[in-house]
Image (spheres, grey):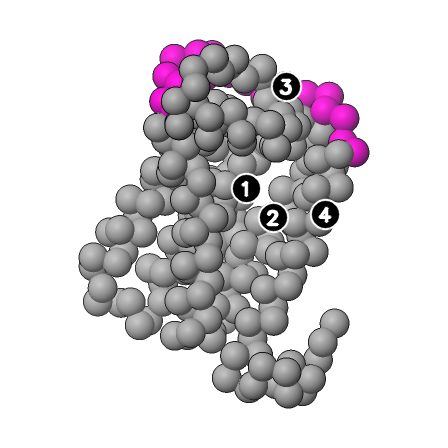
Amino acid sequence: MINEETAERIIGKKYSHFLWLFIFLALTIWFGYLKKTIVPKHIIYCSLDYYIPFVKEFVVAYLFWFAYMSIGLLYLGLKSKKDFYKLVLFLASCMSISYIIFIIYPNAQFPRPIITKRDIFSRMVSFIYSIDGTNNVFPSIHVANAIGVHASLINCDILKNSGKVKTASFIAMIAICASTVLIKQHSIIDVAGGVVLAFIVYIFIYKIPKTQ
């Protein structure tokens, strides 16, 4: 791991904290390994999933997750190093805990719908299905990390009076969470798991330190 002194020589003291983003490269490699090696033993599904419609247009919100993560990390990295570190810890914690759950409780999604239409949204959903297998879905990292970004923004001092930013972030978070079930990438159980995971991590990062 590059130490702080080396990092400062490479990109300067002001932005050396951005090197912590390399942790997500390691986590992504780990995720890919688990996707290829874990054989699911538990199917995640509940009767409520049957009543949730397939809304292909929500694939836009699902893919926006990547931009949402990037915007949150970049903004806080430039504006508040303290909050940047908290967000990195939040996201990395949710991802790492999820991976451990995948190993201990190997799971998979109930069979996805067959996409037959060829419009742009259907093609986008089909592409996601083709690159992201049905295993390792509980808890939903999409949900947990979307909540993590929103939590970091609403707890950031420099955005304390930015109601519009907080509202926009909340809408983005809700849309992303909803998209996971509306494009049938996750069960509602996965969403619930992601919410619980994010809540637990939130307590440890934002609440417990205030009591000490």
N-terminal label among 3 and 4: 4
- Label 2 with label 1: CB-CB less than 8 Å: yes
Of the numbered discs 2 and 4, the one sitting upstream in the chain is 4
Identify residue type, mark 1.
Ile
Q: What residue did someone put label 1 on?
A: 141
Asked if one can make out residue 86 in the rendered structure from this viewpoint, the answer is yes
Question: What is the span of residues highlighted in magenta in the rendered image?
Answer: 37-56
Task: Assess whether residue 183 is covered by the magenta stretch.
Answer: no
Label 1 sits on a secondary structure element that is helix
Query: Where's residue 167, x and y in %?
Result: 24, 51
Residue beneath the point at 38% across and 38% down? 61
Give left or right: position of 41 versus 181: right
Is residue 43 shown left or right of residue 51?
Answer: right
Displayed quadrant of residue 139: top right
First along the sequence among labels 1 and 3: 3
Residue 36 in the image: state x and y as whole percent.
75, 34
Tag 2 near tag 3, CB within 8 Å: no
Q: Note whether 32 is above or below 159 in the view shown.
A: above
The residue wearing badge 2 is 95
| Lower sequence index among marks 2 and 3 | 3
